[in-house]
Amino acid sequence: MSETQFSNSVTLRDNRNGATYDFPILDGTMGPSVIDISNFYKDTGMFTLDRGYTSTAMCKSSITYIDGEKGELMHRGYDIAWLAKNKRYLDVVYLLLNKKLPSKEEYNAFLYELKTRSFINEKILKLFDAFPDRAHPMAVLQACIATLSAYYSKDMSFDDPGEYMEMAKRLVAKMPTLAAFYYRHSKGYPIIYPDLARGFTENFLYMMRSFPHSHVDLKPIEVKALDSVLMLHADHEQNASTTTVRTVGSTHAHPYACISAGIGALWGHAHGGANESVIRQLEMIGTPENVDKYIAKAKDKSDPFRLMGFGHRVYKNYDPRAKVLKGLRNQLIEEIGIDTNLIRVANRLEEIVLNDEYFVSRNLYPNVDFNSGLILKALGIPTEMFAVIFVMGRSPGWMAQWIELKEQESIKIVRPRQLYIGPERINE
Ligand code: ACO
């Protein structure tokens, strides 16, 4: 065995010829260590195969920490349950982007900066007309954000570190406006412009629900519930959409092109599209009496049916975000009411999953989408807008991750390899 050149390392032995290779072990501040295999191919002439990157660290990051076994989530060291209890969504946005929580003055200045950036160039509205009736809002939002890159690309200023924060603030500020404007357009309702006298989250609900002749009265619990949903989605380290943002970012693409790609990744029902699928599935199940039939389908290996809103790649415990939202969901149901059959089906499903051997042995718990879907439904948000709300919440996280990528000493383009299993050379 060769003598290791690293203070901590693992040794790989190739049993075909007895050759050994050492790879350094890197320790983070918390969580599992990683084996640095950057030189793996150079040293061994082989690649590693890791479908779905279940054992691969994509990058070094100081933004978000998850302990999936314990069910813990922290942003820049602050526990999500503490943030949800004591802070607002914009505090977390500020924290992700500025690496610290804001003081009262900083919060107010930040809110003002976002408000003044919340208007959009109205030429973008013409894009809405290019879409067929009943286009999914995620398709429209993805196109709108890609279009924003054309409006903010003068002199490639997005590649200037002095512009990163401006890029982030602009995106976070305009996302709710674009989402609400498209919703109004799709319904044929008059567009309601941002009201600078309102708070960030309140403003979105106001743009969604008001009419020129009657401005909506929002209950504090409604604003609080949506604010919490946004906060709990703000970042989640290297999930599929964030990895997409970083992958596109590694090619030095425009940040809004990266975010647009992230929106595409998030749309799928295995990811951010799940909150929409949760409600559609609960509606399909219909009554608590039907739950057992669908539980049986979920457990049947010959049936591709899955229970939406349950299970998570990282959490093998109760998703801490789902825990916070469950309390809020109950509060909301009490205060404003919700379709009771839907809630009864949800309660019955949750009860079975938390006790049934199939789900317990696979560590399948309710995830954030299970409760966020129910909360958004209670808030009267149209189901097809649920993933859009997820995107709104996640935008600052994506931008923080993009900035972190850009601030690295050198960016390595993401370029995985493959195990080729096609035909060998055919010589005709
Ligand atoms: N219903 C029924 N069985 C499930 C479910 C489910 N929702 N989720 C996982 N399983 C089973 C699998 O069939 C598998 O069983 P097996 O070991 O007998 O083959 C086992 O649990 C492990 O499942 P994997 O798919 O290997 O787990 P993975 O970590 O790859 O997938 C995922 C995680 C995609 C979230 C999965 O649990 C799922 O499809 N859930 C439903 C969709 C959903 O709610 N997505 C939102 C995720 S949260 C988010 O993106 C914010």
Image (cartoon, rainbow, N blue to C red):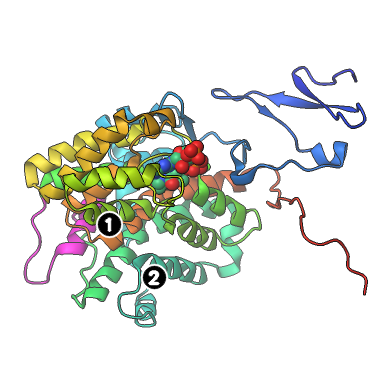
The reply to whether callout 2 and callout 1 are in contact (CB within 8 Å) is no
Residue to which mark 1 is pinned = 280
Q: Is residue 37 left or right of residue 283?
A: right
Residue 229 appears in view: no
Assess disc 2: are there few (<14), some (14-19) or many (≥20) residues with their C-alpha within 10 Å of its C-alpha.
Answer: some
* Range covered by the magenta-colored residues: 197-218
Residue 7 circle label: none
Q: Quadrant of residue 82?
A: top left
Q: Residue at x 27, y 46 (%)?
A: 293
Residue 236, how many percent across, how many down? Answer: 45, 40
**What amino acid type should be assigned to the residue bearing mark 2?**
Val
**What amino acid type should be assigned to the residue bearing mark 1?**
Arg
Q: Quadrant of ligand 1?
A: top left
Residue 280 or residue 112, whichever sits in front: 280
Residue 14 appears in view: yes
Residue to which mark 2 is pinned = 140
Residue 399, how many percent across, how many down? Answer: 48, 50
Q: Is residue 47 magenta?
A: no
